[in-house]
Image (spheres, rainbow, N blue to C red):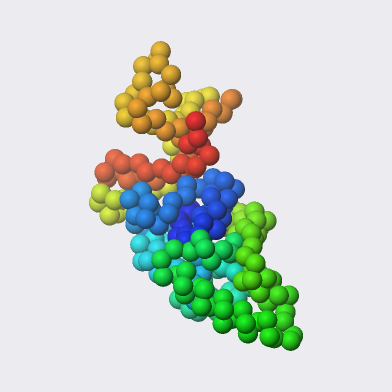
Amino acid sequence: MNAIIYTTNTGSTEHYAKLLAQKTGLPVYSLAEAKKRVFAGAEVIYLGWIMAGSVKGYAEAAKRYRVRAACGIGMGQTGTQTDSVRKKSGISVDIPLFTLQGNFDVKKLHGVYRPMMEIMVKTAGKALAEKKDRTPDEDDMLDMMLHGGERVKAENLSAVLDWSARNNKNRRKCIMMCPKCGKEMRNGYLFSSKDGAFSFASEVPSALENAKNAEGFVKLTGLKVGGRTSVEACCCDACRMILISYGEEAAKI
């Protein structure tokens, strides 16, 4: 897996995407950022907010990347409405789909989505309020419509993390195409000398300088005492090019 990509409106989807990145070590980008920083054809987990039963941005992400799993963030309780969301979003049955309950505050919606949601809350909220035999899920949704609510929780990601762990253990290494020649790259690892760590900067600092002060410094890995630090990498022998991805946590100084 190469990255986590998301589209957000009020912030719930971004929150889940960053929580997932912390748990998996994968880099995380908004869809707009990903277009500049993630190669076309990369394997990704995509998260989008649900509007009118469809995962926003999924179709665009699926055209550019190899979406291995999708998450839809909406008002419904976590793990519900997957069949209808899958159908409306055009997500094929071979791609795992997870629905996650997000926060709800109409005032945080942007653009035309705010008046659209205000109308939906009035009409659907009235219908739910008048319904005599509401389910617990419908009671929760009505409460969110009337009073708003904070529903983003790390534990809601448990099914996604279980899938990710199984996928990483059992899957074949991802296929990455060389951005220069277009041929399939071979998978492997870029590793250091013992106890070493990888970093990136605009120029290599001298041995007497603090590397963290170098222009454009990025920490790729930490030290691994008594072993070799490594990152997954793809190599194109023809172009003599190596591509790597580094996690958000590793990049922190």
Q: Residue at x 51, y 78 (%)?
A: 119
Q: Is residue 248 left or right of residue 98?
A: left
Expressed as whole percent of the image width and height from the top left, the position of residue 148 reads 62, 65
Q: Residue at x 32, y 45 (%)?
A: 236
In this rendering, the answer to whether 184 lies above or below 214 is: below
Residue 76 at least partly seen? no
Q: Residue at x 58, y 64 (%)?
A: 104
Q: Is residue 181 left or right of residue 50?
A: left
Expressed as whole percent of the image width and height from the top left, the position of residue 184 reads 34, 54
Q: Is residue 234 left or right of residue 84?
A: left
In this rendering, the answer to whether 140 lies above or below 183 is: below
Residue 237 at least partly seen? yes
**Residue nearest the observer in this picture, 103 or 19:** 103
Q: Quadrant of residue 101?
A: bottom right
Q: Is residue 143 left or right of residue 35?
A: right
**Residue nearest the observer in this picture, 85 or 200:** 85
In this rendering, the answer to whether 106 lies above or below 81 is: above
Q: Quadrant of residue 136?
A: bottom right
Q: Residue at x 39, y 46 (%)?
A: 234
Q: Residue furthest top?
A: 208
